[in-house]
Amino acid sequence: METYTGNRGLRIEEPLIFEQDSPGRTGVDLSDVPDVEDRLGGLSRTEPIGLPGLSEPQVMRHYTRLSQKNYAIDAGFYPLGSCTMKHNPRLNEKMARLPGFADVHPLQPESTVQGALELIDTLAHWIKTLTGMPAVAMSPAAGAHGELCGLMTARSALEARGDARKRVLVPDSAHGTNPATAAICGYDVQAIPLNDRGRVDLAALQDALDEDVAAFMLTNPNTCGLFENEILEQAKAVHDAGAFFYCDGANFNAIVGRVRPGDLGIDCMHLNLHKTFSTPHGGGGPGSGPVVLSEALAPYAPIPWVVHGDNGFALIEHAADSGESEPYGRMKSFHGQMGMFVRTLAYMMSHGADGLRQASSDAVLNANYLLARLSDTLSLPYEGPCMHEVLFDDSFLKDTGVTTLNFAKAMIDEGFHPMTMYFPLVVHGALLMEPTETESREGLDQFIYTIRHLAERARSGEADAFQEAPVHAPRRRLDETGAARQPILRWRPDITLGEAAE
């Protein structure tokens, strides 16, 4: 039954903040602006500034209600495969707010930021220890930025030896940013197919390698949630061809404390700190993607670096001061994302080596628990155990009239954020689930029972109900195609909500 207000109990309908505008209403009293000389040359504003007028209680209620409509890892199970939606320990947040870290400024004299530089140096040490790599570039701002850093480092090394190679090999199971990064660096991209086990076809890789290949970009564990168990053979083939071996470290959470990438023959690998070390995911916000480098690539790492100087810690910020190294330049302003560094080191130190190893082990255990409990109900594209995420396909929905998207929408009505859909692209109708290490068995069981229930409903002929879902979400079923083709990104009074999704 629809309610008069549109509210449903404590889930309250909330108009846009601009629609609540009442001219002249404000939460603060401001003094009248005194008469001053006009120095704007006739460019003074002639119309209202466009900000809504609301009282303080209205503003508080508006943003509180909006926050209640947002799904988050703090609200419930978030099985978004590939994205690794980890719990963010509150201890990390407390450390990041400490004076000297929260208020540090990148233009302060080195003598006043010795603690911050020591923290960066200590974190770099533990990153190198966990990966078995001799060097790390700390400044890249995100995973894709780290990919760019790694490939630019490899290109610099090739140029230094006078080797102008033109191609980069990228498996079909790699993250989509890998071929984009290679293209940005000016390389031609050649795809390497998978075998029937969901892993890189080693023979196809060997056939593609020649003196024109600059690098091979592998994601391991790959986007099918599987470990590339022929990685040593892959590394040998790549190095025998004179190319560099890049590894996408987005899935390092599955192997940290158990496998050191440096022992696998990898030359460079980026780390998404949010995926492995619990910093906030950010939704495009506070990213950080340090890149570990082999001995062959370390001399070409971008500046800045933290070094141990005569008077404590110092920064190498100019190529002229880098000694025998040949840095290719700078990836970004200043020294990296300090807040993420603090959180990462807090996570490492609070867990210790044994705790980090257990976290990765529990992530793999939880994913395989989903695999074991759902494999008789959903359909698997590849047999065998998985790593930190489990991949299903949509074969179980054949002839039901229910699509992967419909199934995901029905999960919203059940109070779950959907898993990643239609990715990786190599699997038709992919459903990629990643539970992470902090989910309890009780939470996983509730999710499992729900998925089994929805699968049974789909097979019992309830396609119409799936096609209408979600019916309990605040915005119900959106016209996503219309919103994508005619997005309304800015509110104007003459635009109605019915014309497209806001």
Image: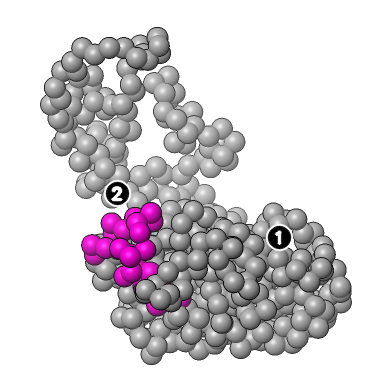
Q: Residue 182, labelled with which disc?
A: 1
Residue at 28% of width from left, 59% of height from top? 102
Determine the image quadrant of residue 33. Answer: top left
Q: Position of residue 128 (x, y in %)?
A: 50, 81
Residue 80 visible from this viewpoint: no
Q: Relative to 487, is 473 on the left or the right?
A: left
**Amino acid type of disc 2?**
Ser
Task: Indicate whether 465 appears above or below 161.
Answer: above
Element on which disc 1 rests: helix
Residues drawn in magenta = 98-124
N-terminal of the pair, mark 1 or mark 2, is: 2
Determine the image quadrant of residue 119. Answer: bottom left
Q: Relative to 382, is 17 on the left or the right?
A: left
Cα separation between marks 1 and 2: 38 Å
Q: Residue 368, labelled with which disc?
A: none
How crowded pointer 1 is (Cα within 10 Å; few <14, some 14-19, many 20+) is rated as many
Q: Is residue 114 magenta?
A: yes
Residue 310 visible from this viewpoint: yes
Residue at 53% of width from left, 74% of height from top? 136
Q: Position of residue 28 (x, y in %)?
A: 14, 30
Residue at 43% of width from left, 50% of height from top? 470
Closest to the observer, 420 or 394:
420
Which residue in the structure is indicated by mark 2? Answer: 67
Q: Relative to 442, is 176 on the left or the right?
A: right
Quadrant the N terminus occupies: top left
Task: Indicate whether 356 appears above or below 153.
Answer: below
Task: Indicate whether 477 appears above or below 246.
Answer: above
Residue at 43% of width from left, 87% of height from top? 357
**Amino acid type of disc 1?**
Ala
